[in-house]
Image (tube, rainbow, N blue to C red):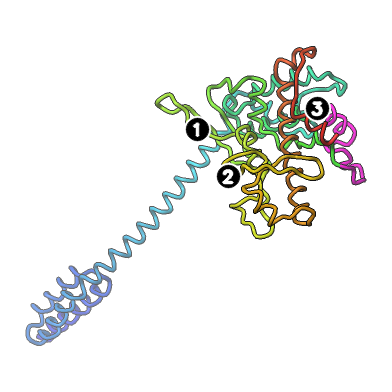
Amino acid sequence: MEANKEQATKCLNIARRSLREGDAAKARRFAEKAGRLGGAAVGDQVAALLREIETGGSSSANGAAARGSSGASKGTEELRRRRNERASSSAQREEEDKGTPEQRSLVKRINGCENYYDILGISDKQCSEDAIKRSYKKLALKLHPDKCRVRGAEDAFKAVSRAFSCLSDPEKRRSYDRFGSEQPGFGSGGGGGAPSGFYRHNAQDIDPEELFNMFFGGSPFGHTTHFHNARGFHQRRRRPSQGGTQDVTFNLGAIMQLLPVLFLVLFTLIGNSPSDPVYSLHMQGKYNARETTTMRGIDFYVKSHSKFDREYPKGTYARRRVDVAVEKDYRQFLENECWRERMRYRGGAAGRNRDAKVVMKSCTKLSEIWG
């Protein structure tokens, strides 16, 4: 009997240890064996242990399962992370491998150049404007992002557009040859003045896609690519939809056409909010009462003569501020339109036929008013 009781005690200890370890089946098996060996002497202990197994065993089992599940989850996350890293690396290699060796070499060369002549592949700085134009056309067709998928092609395409925009303009080209910049006086140690109104546009202001379309009459690749320029206009790529139609997008050309609206508001005049501009450069909507600036006689439009004269009496500082703002906006509008006319002249039929008579109304108007 003593031997059986000793064996029963050992079985109880094994059962308790198994229960702590979360093995309820083993704990039950040894608890029942202890009951058979020890009989009534260990009956109470066996009964208590079996109850504990019934109530706590499921909890322990669940805990073990949860720990296993947690471990499995961590393993799954690690596997997913490695798989994503491999996919990302593979996608990057695939992107780098796109295009022909010639395209990759061309993109690398242009993105490594800082000089505009080097970008266009021109060694003779005394070359004609036609040579610059030919070089631009050749490179633009090769580097257009809709054709060239090499990494960095978009940056190279922009660089070619900037180089052409500068070197095709006589005044900008002279400034660039002298100072290494489009802006006269830049980098020369002095604070040279800004260029005249005709050439106030920096090359960064040019939309490469708009310049491309001026030469080729729209993208020859079936859809249009636009870029982010220095002024932050949001531009995106347009591709044909499945139904054969194209999504409507806005490019810089459309925005330029809206400049009469965009540049006509004065946001900080006394008592006015940005949503209620004081004037408009053109008659539209509620702005149908014509006024004229005192200094240069520029027409603009307000909502009401009486209200405008009451809030901005003639001869007051507030009225002079309005006049200055109107003339500044109108000059900016003419400069933008003049620039567009000049680019059309260089890129269009007149660019090929210098004898053609081209009327540039905005440039003429700008010269008449501001000289």
Q: Nearer the viewer, residue 1 or 70?
A: 70
- Mark 3 element type: loop
Report the side of 282 relative to 178 (left or right).
Answer: left
The mark that comes first in sequence, 1 or 3, is: 3
Please give the range of residues in magenta: 170-193
Residue 204: which quarter of the image?
top right
Residue 167, horizontal then vertical, whole percent:
80, 27
Q: Which residue is mark 2?
A: 286
| Residue pictured at 32% horizontal, 61% vertical | 68
The residue singled out by tag 1 in the image is 248
Badge 3: how crowded within 10 Å, few (<14), some, or many (20+)? some
Q: Considering only vertical position in the picture, is 133 above or below 16?
A: above
Q: CA distance from mark 1 to mark 3?
A: 32 Å
User: How far across and how far down the image is residue 219, in percent?
Assistant: 58, 23
Above or below: residue 74 compared with residue 325: below
Q: CA distance from mark 2 to mark 1?
A: 29 Å
Whether 188 is among the magenta residues is: yes
Identify the image quadrant of residue 368.
top right
Numbered mark located on residue 169 in the image: 3
Q: Nearer the viewer, residue 157 or 297?
A: 297
Q: Which mark is residue 259?
A: none
| Frontmost residue, 200 versus 125 | 200
* Quadrant holding the C terminus: top right
Under circle 1, the secondary element is loop
